[in-house]
């Protein structure tokens, strides 16, 4: 009797596992079929896509419970781009079906790699003259690049994180919110940039190759500044009270020449339509890194003049502009520029419009009414002042 029960238990287990395996094979077939249909749709929507292939789909052993599966080794090839993307593994943790279409609830990949970079490098070096002048700078960004992403759906919103690495060093980290997510009416989707951070150091720039025809610039830079290194740090964060509003804090350094700091306050309604967005308070500060003092010394020797005479010559050239332009804002700008020439430390530009200015209005006025735009921006110039935080009312009243 015991043997009979054991045999029945084993048979039941075998039948159960067989049925489960058949169900899993059927699910695998359905998901693979849907995946192939989605790829076919991508070909029709984006004709520039040359090829999309993937090794296979692997289901979690508990797929019926947790709805987890992976897409393995996804290759993407785009026309006229001499490299391929390899996404080693896309992990999908749960999903929902809407109108017979598939939408992941949570999706991520820790390894998005670029292949055939050597071919790209050779094409840049040998064929494309426009890109070849930026050869060293482009090589910087082709140094073992890798990316990762994570997206999660919750309460009618997708939260998306994207990271980019060079030589395993994190250089870009950004987060987005796709609000009002509507699979049917995609026009209602609103994309917000939650935060954005870039950290790049020692980007090479060869001024002779990049600006070969600009002899005036080459003369100013001289032989000591032909090969430059650039540092770039950008922090963009939406405010806690309103994710439409955001602050930008950036630092751009051209080593041994100048440091540029930027603070700005934005109102961005939708990343998909940036022209409707606007900006408010903005500050720029340019800090000389002993470049102008070196330039004055070289000009002094070359022209057999004192350093003060070299400075006065530059100031006279600036003042010639006042013959052609009579505008209080320009006059103030030249006055502060002349102070900066005399004592090259910092030059700051402050913009504080009474009302936010949309990108559309800014671009239109820049073409049609330049001086009207300067007045609308409520722009002010200050030389040799310490960097002022954006909320400092001394300059924004």
Image (spheres, rainbow, N blue to C red):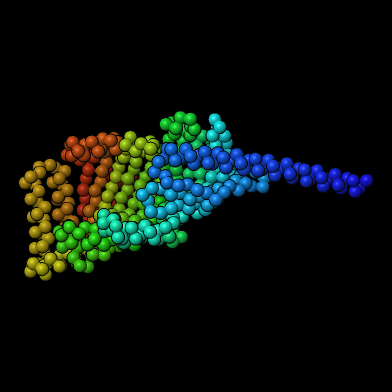
Nearest the viewer among 159 and 184 is: 184
Horizontal placement of 305 versus 135: left or right? left
Q: Is residue 377 above or below residue 135?
A: above
Quarter of the figure with the C terminus: top left
**From this viewpoint, which residue is outermost toward the right?**
1
Between residue 373 and residue 345, name the one nearer to us: 373
Q: Is residue 369 above or below residue 56?
A: above
Measuring 17% from the left and 51% from the top, which residue is drawn there?
336
Q: Position of residue 384 (x, y in %)?
A: 22, 55
Whether residue 306 sits left or right of residue 192 in the image: it is: left
Q: Is residue 210 visible?
A: yes
Answer with the quarter of the image where residue 209 lies. bottom left
User: Which residue does the image show at 53% across and 41% down from the upper left?
Assistant: 36
Across and down, in percent, residue 84 comes to 43, 53
Q: Position of residue 168 (x, y in %)?
A: 46, 60
Decide if residue 325 is on the left or right side of residue 156: left
- Near-viewer residue (138 or 330): 138
Residue at image position (24%, 48%) is 349
């Amino acid at each position: 009797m015991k043997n009979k029960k054991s045999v029945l238990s084993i048979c039941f287990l075998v039948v159960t596992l067989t049925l489960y395996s058949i169900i899993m094979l059927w699910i695998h077939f359905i998901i693979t079929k849907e995946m192939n249909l989605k790829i076919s749709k991508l070909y029709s929507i984006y004709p520039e896509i040359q090829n999309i292939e993937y090794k296979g789909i692997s289901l979690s052993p508990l797929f019926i419970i947790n709805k987890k599966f992976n897409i393995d080794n996804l290759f993407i090839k785009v026309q006229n781009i001499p490299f391929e993307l390899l996404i080693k593994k896309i992990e999908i943790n749960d999903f929902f079906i809407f109108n017979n279409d598939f939408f992941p609830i949570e999706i991520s990949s820790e390894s998005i790699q670029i292949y055939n970079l050597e071919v790209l490098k050779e094409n840049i070096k040998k064929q494309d003259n426009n890109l070849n002048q930026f050869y060293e700078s482009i090589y910087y960004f082709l140094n073992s690049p890798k990316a990762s992403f994570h997206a999660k759906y919750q309460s009618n919103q997708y939260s998306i994180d994207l990271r980019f690495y060079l030589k395993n060093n994190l250089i870009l980290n950004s987060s987005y919110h796709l609000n009002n997510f509507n699979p049917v009416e995609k026009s209602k989707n609103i994309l917000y940039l939650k935060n954005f951070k870039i950290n790049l150091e020692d980007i090479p720039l060869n001024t002779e190759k990049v600006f070969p025809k600009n002899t005036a610039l080459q003369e100013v830079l001289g032989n000591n500044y032909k090969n430059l290194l650039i540092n770039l740090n950008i922090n963009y964060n939406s405010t806690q009270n309103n994710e439409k509003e955001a602050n930008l804090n950036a630092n751009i350094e051209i080593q041994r020449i100048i440091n540029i700091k930027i603070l700005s306050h934005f109102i961005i309604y939708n990343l998909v339509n940036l022209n409707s967005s606007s900006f408010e308070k903005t500050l720029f500060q340019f800090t000389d890194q002993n470049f102008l003092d070196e330039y004055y010394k070289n000009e002094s020797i070359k022209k057999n003049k004192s350093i003060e005479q070299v400075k006065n010559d530059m100031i006279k050239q600036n003042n010639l502009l006042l013959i052609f332009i009579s505008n209080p804002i320009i006059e103030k700008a030249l006055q502060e520029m002349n102070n900066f020439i005399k004592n090259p430390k910092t030059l700051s530009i402050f913009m504080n419009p009474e009302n936010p200015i949309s990108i559309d209005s800014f671009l239109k006025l820049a073409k049609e009414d330049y001086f009207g735009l300067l007045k609308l921006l409520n722009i002010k110039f200050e030389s040799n002042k310490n960097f002022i935080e954006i909320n400092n009312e001394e300059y924004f009243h």
